Image (cartoon, rainbow, N blue to C red):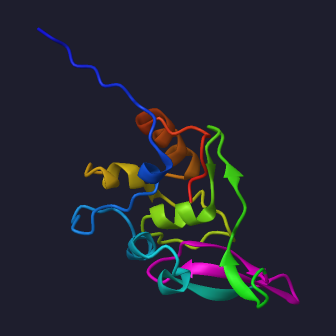
Amino acid sequence: MSQETTTTSPITREQAILPPPPTSKTSSFCKGAISLQQNPRSLKHALRLQTRPDGLYNHTRLFQCRHCHFSGPSYTSSSSGKKEIISDPTIHISSTGIPYRWTYLAKSHVKTKMVGEMGVTGMTSFACLVCMGVGRMSGVYGGVETLMEHLRDEHGVDGGFVLD
């Protein structure tokens, strides 16, 4: 009897951000995440800008998914001479050492039913873009760190590039 072993080979940046096939009926992703995957430059098509109170006299602007309660911070950029609202440009580093931006999480989220605190994604679950991109069914991962551990263990993603 021969025993099959599977080896994990590192993936490229392009493979890590591939959108799942549009014909996939088994997708776990929220409709807003799918919209972002298909048109990543159009945040405002998949997300809406929302203002929430922040203390007694302040407010905070967030991007919130149009189909669920997934949300994240927004920033004002004036790099092109005019002010525009952009998503969080910060490169976060997971405990596994994988760098990512908030937009990667926005493309990976599954429908969030509960409103969390601003920018907190610990209550949000995610599906794997890589699994879906190669035609495999994705599990649902309960939080950022669990998703990053899956990407490291199953797909060989390391800190060689930023997921966005």
Task: Describe residue 134's horizontal placement relative to residue 141 as left or right.
Answer: left
Q: Nearer the viewer, residue 51 or 83?
A: 83
Q: Nearer the viewer, residue 55 or 8?
A: 8
Q: Residue shown at 33%/61% (left/top)? A: 20
User: Magenta region: which residues?
Assistant: 53-78
Q: Residue shown at 54%/80% (left/top)? A: 43
Task: Describe residue 162's horizontal placement relative to residue 73 as left or right.
Answer: left
Give the number of callouts: 0
Name above or below for residue 13 compared with residue 2.
Answer: below
Task: Describe residue 16's horizontal placement relative to residue 54 as left or right.
Answer: left
Q: Residue shown at 52%/77% (left/top)? A: 41
Q: Is residue 138 visible?
A: no
Name above or below for residue 35 compared with residue 91.
Answer: below
Magenta includes 139? Answer: no
Name above or below for residue 32 compared with residue 17.
Answer: below
Q: Quadrant of residue 67?
A: bottom left
Task: Describe residue 132's horizontal placement relative to residue 60 as left or right.
Answer: left
Magenta includes 59? Answer: yes
Q: Quadrant of the N terminus?
A: top left
Magenta stretch, main secondary structure, is strand
- Residue 33's x, y, as percent? 44, 70
Q: Nearer the viewer, residue 111 or 163?
A: 163
- Residue 14's x, y, as percent? 45, 53
Name above or below for residue 51 compared with residue 153.
Answer: below
- Residue 39's x, y, as percent? 44, 76
Q: Residue shown at 47%/77% (left/top)? A: 68
Q: Is residue 56 visible?
A: yes
The residue positioned farthest toward the front in the image shown: 80
Q: Quadrant of the C terminus?
A: bottom right
